Amino acid sequence: MPAFDLPPGELEAHRPLPEEPPGFDAFWRDTLKEAAQTDPLVSVRPVETGLRLTESWDVTFRGFAGDPVRAWFTRPAGVREPLPAVVEYAGYGRGRGLPHERLTWVNAGYAHLLMDNRGQGDQYGNGGATPDPHATAPGGPGPAVRGLLDPRDHHYRRLITDAVRAVAAVRALPGVDATRTAAVGNSQGGGLALAVAGLVPDLAAALVTAPLLCGIRRALDLTDAGPYGEITAYLSVHRGSEQAAYRTLSYLEGISFARRAHAPAHFGVGLRDTVCPPSGAYAAFNRYADLTGTDPRKEIHAYPFNGHEGGDAVHVRRQLLWLREVLEVTSLSA
């Protein structure tokens, strides 16, 4: 796929202001306040994986509306001192899978929590274990359009709340240094990590790759691929619903979350990405922390000849080296 978005020089200067609804902050403050009424953890059960160098637990925590959300928690075997934690969010349509699938972060010496995606997990991978009991509002079959006509009903209101609660859950687990917690994700997971950065003021770091939900209105004009294509398909049938949909999506806009972030941030983007157009990632990066009065460390890595896969393992290596350095600085200043 050839490059189709803005040329590199324009991407680097791309700083659009999102069309924020006037009640954006109150909407999320009230949503998260309701979710925080109970302790996050429900259960923590050890799991036998056949791996000798890691230990794993099946964690259930309370997410949106107190709903049980599943996660895998993994630590290096035999290490008892408190470790910095990485909370990872999975991509669109993927569930948490199996506990031995994602070992990069635990092998780097972190405590690792992989959150399940409620109501997802059936498109690829090895499935999920978290239903979405609220997925009854009007909308299409895909998560991106569930509850599209009202922000209170939308799937991503629930999933973003779960993502914030996952941070509270990992901080409540034994052997975790709560002051050094990072949010990590690609695609949908990148959009969730960015939302968490905007909603959790004491997050230690955010690693955001090919983020979904950034520059949503522009993305709907640029691509019919992936989740954005589900939205356009829905609107092609439900003619006249555009304004209600745009209003809902404005409460989920990643650029708005980015503007409210404080944590150091590491971004990655493929310039030929037709699933999550690169202009969205650049807009979030360029607007990052511009409402907080802070100047956190941030960097973005672009891969000119790559699509949604971005820098793949090359980018992960950059993430590992960057996060180690950032969290060591956090530890020294704590």
Image (cartoon, rainbow, N blue to C red):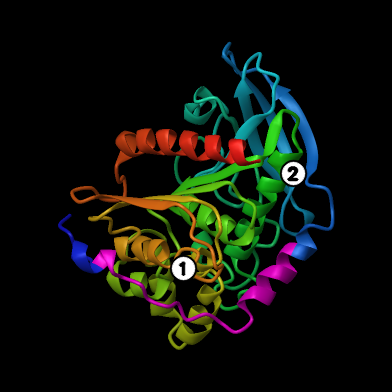
Q: Is residue 23 magenta?
A: yes
Q: Residue at x 79, y 64 (%)?
A: 34
- Residue lying furthest right in this view? 38
Q: Which numbered disc, 1 or 2, marks the residue that appears first in the sequence?
A: 2
* Any part of residue 122 in sight: no
- Left or right: where 33 falls relative to 152: right
Q: Position of residue 139 (x, y in %)?
A: 54, 71
Q: In the image, which is nearer the foreground, mark 1 or mark 2?
A: 1
- Left or right: where 299 falls relative to 259: left
Taking depth in this image into account, of 322 and 294 the one nearest to the observer is 294
Q: Position of residue 67 (x, y in %)?
A: 75, 52
* Screen quadrant of the C terminus: top right
Mark 1 → mark 2, Cα distance in angstroms: 28 Å
Q: Amino acid at mark 2?
A: Phe
Mark 1 lies on residue: 255
Please report contact status of discs 1 and 2: CB closer than 8 Å, yes or no: no
Residue range of the region highlighted in magenta in the rendering? 11-32
Q: Which element is circle 1 on?
A: helix
